[in-house]
Image (tube, rainbow, N blue to C red):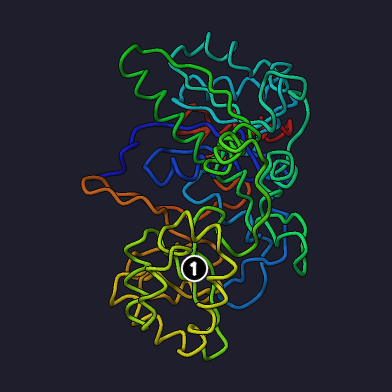
């Protein structure tokens, strides 16, 4: 069977990451996604290189890795929405679409007659998703927002990095744009909920989703730690604030292994297997609550033990007794990992430049399939086809729009 969103059309007026991540997920699920881009320049991330995609003959193209990461499965249509004719094209496309995703600053599209109120009057079933840094209400509604700023203001950096007093201490940015990516995921969830509502009522609706809101919501247990204790959580570096032992340990071959003890039974099995059963009976370490209080003492004892075996030896042993563990891998090692390969987490798509590798969507349905039918498009490569197929524009009409610089 085809993807679960087959027959749905998405009009994508977003750029950079949160919005394109949303629409790439929808494309993977079978929706037709029409990506609207500025003529000549396109999505900002097209220029966020190096690195660039290398063609089959080895030369560098002008397709940035950043752009390629979030735009597969889409049709690129260049439209100058600063021109009235361009704005009218968007209105026509909105009338033929089920979903619209945009990430303009609050109020930006209203000036062009492309806001929810205007477009929903033309298409009452339209689901219109607005992604902004701070939302459409509140004192910062009109401010632009970027992932780094949101990680800082949303509290994530305050709990990420080495603890005070340790080498390299200080707030740190997470290595990927988690505020953007989690916002894209939440926007997708919101759209799917709105689609269900539409099947019941026939009504579309406006979705207002903000990076800051999402980042705050993803504080999860750390926010609850604050609510319960009254104390803001701090950076704890490599170890977990609520579980012990749950951190990296040194091994005999100079590598590190993550050992993630999630309950008392796992801790007891590990201690007994390595000949330190008395630790699991020690009142300081018998329960997780006590292990958290006496973490420093316990870790000193365990480090002496973990240094006696290699990473591979520990992995075999801990897997045999059902204690979660694993290596710290770089990204090359990730895609060489047999488990990652078995799960099909890398895909390759054909493009005009040759094969384009990418990360697969993690969703695996039993009845429907995700689709990887189209590599990230070159700028404007689908302009003529979309205008002709979706809006029934004639060749002469398309040529006239090109002459005016509208497309």
Q: How many marks?
A: 1
Q: Is residue 225 above or below residue 61?
A: above
Q: Quadrant of the C terminus?
A: top right
Whole-percent x and y of residue 140? Answer: 76, 25
Answer with the quarter of the image where residue 309 lies: bottom left
Residue identified by numbered label 1 = 355
Camera-nearest residue between 302 and 238? 302
Q: Residue furthest top?
A: 121
**Where, quadrant-wise, is the N terminus in this rendering?**
top left
Dividing the picture into quadrants, the one containing residue 226 is top right
Tell me the SS state at disc 1.
strand
Q: Residue at x 77, y 67 (%)?
A: 168
Q: Position of residue 268 (x, y in %)?
A: 34, 69
Q: Residue visible at 69% across and 59% down? A: 161
Measuring from the top left, give residue 294's x and y in whole percent.
55, 63
Name which residue lies at 60% across and 11% down: 118
Dividing the picture into quadrants, the one containing residue 288 is bottom left
Residue 354 horizontal side relative to residue 41, left or right:
left
* Position above or below: 209 against 225: above
Q: Position of residue 76 (x, y in %)?
A: 57, 43
Residue situated in front as seen by the camera: 86 or 306: 306
Horizontal relation, residue 122 to residue 86: left or right: left
- Crowd class of label 1 (few under 14; some 14 to 19; many from 20; radius 10 Å): some
Front-lying residue, 388 or 62? 62
| Residue 85 in the image: above or below residue 33 | above
Q: Between 68 and 226, which is closer to the camera in this rendering?
A: 226
Does residue 120 appear to the left or right of 372 in the view shown? Answer: right
């Amino acid at each position: 069977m085809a993807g679960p969103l087959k027959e749905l059309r998405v009009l994508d007026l977003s750029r950079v990451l949160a919005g394109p991540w949303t629409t790439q997920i929808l494309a993977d699920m079978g929706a037709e996604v029409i990506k609207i881009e500025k003529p000549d320049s396109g999505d900002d991330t097209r220029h966020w290189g190096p690195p660039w995609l290398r063609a089959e003959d080895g030369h560098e193209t002008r397709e940035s890795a950043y752009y390629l990461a979030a735009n597969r499965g889409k049709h690129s249509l260049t439209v100058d929405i600063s021109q009235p004719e361009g704005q009218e094209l968007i209105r026509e496309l909105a009338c033929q679409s089920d979903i619209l995703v945009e990430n303009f600053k609050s109020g930006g599209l209203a000036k062009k007659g492309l806001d929810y109120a205007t477009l929903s009057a033309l298409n009452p079933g339209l689901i219109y998703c607005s992604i902004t840094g701070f939302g459409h209400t509140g004192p910062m509604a009109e401010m632009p927002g970027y992932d780094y700023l949101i990680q800082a203001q949303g509290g994530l950096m305050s709990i990420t990095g080495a603890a005070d007093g340790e080498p390299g201490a200080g707030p740190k940015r997470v290595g990927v744009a988690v505020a953007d990516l989690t916002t894209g995921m939440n926007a997708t969830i919101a759209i799917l909920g709105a689609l269900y509502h539409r099947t019941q009522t026939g009504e579309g609706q406006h979705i207002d989703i903000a990076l800051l809101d999402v980042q705050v919501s993803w504080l999860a247990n750390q926010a609850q730690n604050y609510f319960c204790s009254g104390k803001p959580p701090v950076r704890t570096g490599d170890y977990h604030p609520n579980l012990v032992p749950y951190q990296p340990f040194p091994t005999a071959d100079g590598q590190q292994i993550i050992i993630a003890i999630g309950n008392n039974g796992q801790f007891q099995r590990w201690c007994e297997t390595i000949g330190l059963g008395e630790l699991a009976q020690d009142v300081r370490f018998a329960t997780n609550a006590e292990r958290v209080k006496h973490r420093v003492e316990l870790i000193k004892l365990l480090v002496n033990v973990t240094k006696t075996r290699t990473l591979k030896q520990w992995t075999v042993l801990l897997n045999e007794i059902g204690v979660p563990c694993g290596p710290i891998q770089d990204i090359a090692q990730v895609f060489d990992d047999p488990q990652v390969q078995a799960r099909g987490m890398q895909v390759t798509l054909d493009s005009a430049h040759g094969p384009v590798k990418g990360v697969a969507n993690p969703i695996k349905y039993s009845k429907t399939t995700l689709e990887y039918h189209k590599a990230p498009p070159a700028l404007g490569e689908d302009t003529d086809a979309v205008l002709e197929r979706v809006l029934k524009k004639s060749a002469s009409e398309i040529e006239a729009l090109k002459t005016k610089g509208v497309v």
